[in-house]
Amino acid sequence: MSERGASWVDEALREHEEHTAAEHTAAVDQAAEHGAAEHGTGGRPGSPSDREQQVLDRIDRARRRRPRIREERITMSHGAGGKATHTLIEAVFLDAFRNPLLEPLEDAAQLQVGGARLALTTDSYVVSPLFFPGGNIGDLAVNGTVNDLAVSGATPLYLSAGFVLEEGFPVADLTTIVASMTAAAAAAGVQIVTGDTKVVERGKADGCYINTAGVGVVEHDLALGAATARPGDAVIVSGPVGDHGVTIMLARGELDIEADLASDTAPMNTMIAGLLAAVPGVRAMRDATRGGVATILNEVAVAAGVGVLVEEDQIPVRTQVRGAAELLGIDPMYVACEGRLVAIVDGEQADRALAALHAHALGEQAAVIGRITTDQPGIVLLRTAFGGTRIVDLLVGDPLPRIC
């Protein structure tokens, strides 16, 4: 299957049609041979529910095939957080670097150092434009790294900051970015303790790229991770989705769309600490960045071998985001956030989790949007506002590149 041209769903449907046609031919031949048609048992085999299950089974088999990159060169889709990114990570990086600490592919690695349990994460930021409503690349880098540590259950402590600067980049802009990083670090209660600077020739970069790494300490015994989700668990988002991605797209000025909208970039560590203190039944947490909520839920479904059923009416989306997304032909479920949490929580503790989130300014609009199920393991289903269901698959790439 081409990563560019077909999805797992497309491949599964095509395979299903071919398989069903072959089954139909075989059934007709068998009916003719044994005279079954006279007894009313001939014709197209399988009920509609059977055919639907066959499609879902083929989707699952397609997902479990060994990942392989078919492209000869890296494309933008490989950095967008969708199927192409997952294939790149699993087929190249995980295959080469495989070890027990890396294999969970969580937002931060869990390390045992002496008697301490630490979390380590790293991220690079190439957002375009560098300055946007609600923030800039500087506070985005700090907040993003703090959040990766926090969703792993760690208390963020120390960050590094590496800069790749293009010749000719205004010193005033760099000063503004660094000031934003300083303020964001202070707000999150972390320190930037080491760093690096490189300058490349004019035209060899896009002004400024930032790489950050973060270290935090894990002070509880919870084993958080996507693979721990269980049937009956609640799926919670901490607030409206899609703010950051749509804000970035509009800030590029490529579309004649205006909206009173700002990025949701923010450090979530204090909100998450309150959630963990109040709810022992938290199974997993992810910050919904590249690929949005839909990508996270697919990762949970596959890692835990469970189904996920999401209620479209329960997903909080700002009117401005929904309107802009409709004009762009984008589902807000796939649009990046930079200050939103997706949590998988014991279903019996969902109300307690909502109360803990609502007590924090960033979680005032938190909502339960779905449940973990035993149906269709590895598949995310969305119950639409019209009462039907549809599969929420991973995108190959991202309709909004370079949003972080």
Image: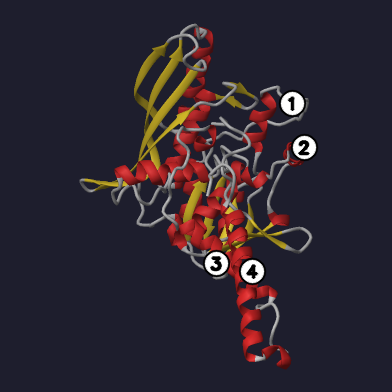
Helix, strand or loop under label 1: loop
Residue pointed to by mark 2: 327
Tell me the distance, in whole angstroms, between the alpha carbons under discs 1 and 2: 10 Å
Between discs 1 and 2, the one toward the N terminus: 1
Q: Residue at x 73, y 40 (%)?
A: 329
Mark 1–mark 3 Cα distance, whole angstroms, equals 41 Å
Q: Is residue 387 above or below residue 217?
A: below
Vertical arrangement, residue 179 with respect to residue 19, above or below? above
SS state under label 4: helix
Label 1 vs 3, first from the N-terminus? 3
* Marked residue nearer the N-terminal end (2 or 4): 4
Q: Is residue 331 above or below residue 246?
A: below
| Residue 84 visible in the current orientation | yes
Q: Which residue position is annotated with label 1?
A: 255
Dot 2: what SS?
Answer: helix
Give 66 or 273, whichever is nearer the viewer: 66
Mark 2: which amino acid? Leu
CB under 8 Å between discs 1 and 2: yes
Task: Identify the residue at horizontal 40%, vertical 42% (top origin).
Answer: 155
Q: Nearer the viewer, residue 324 or 11?
A: 11
Residue 7 located left or right of residue 158:
right
Q: Is residue 190 left or right of residue 3?
A: left
Q: Nearer the viewer, mark 3 or mark 4?
A: 4
Viewer-proximal residue among 69 and 312: 69
Label of residue 21 in the image: 4
Circle number at residue 243: none
What's the amino acid at mark 4?
A: Ala
Residue at left 47%, top 55%? 284
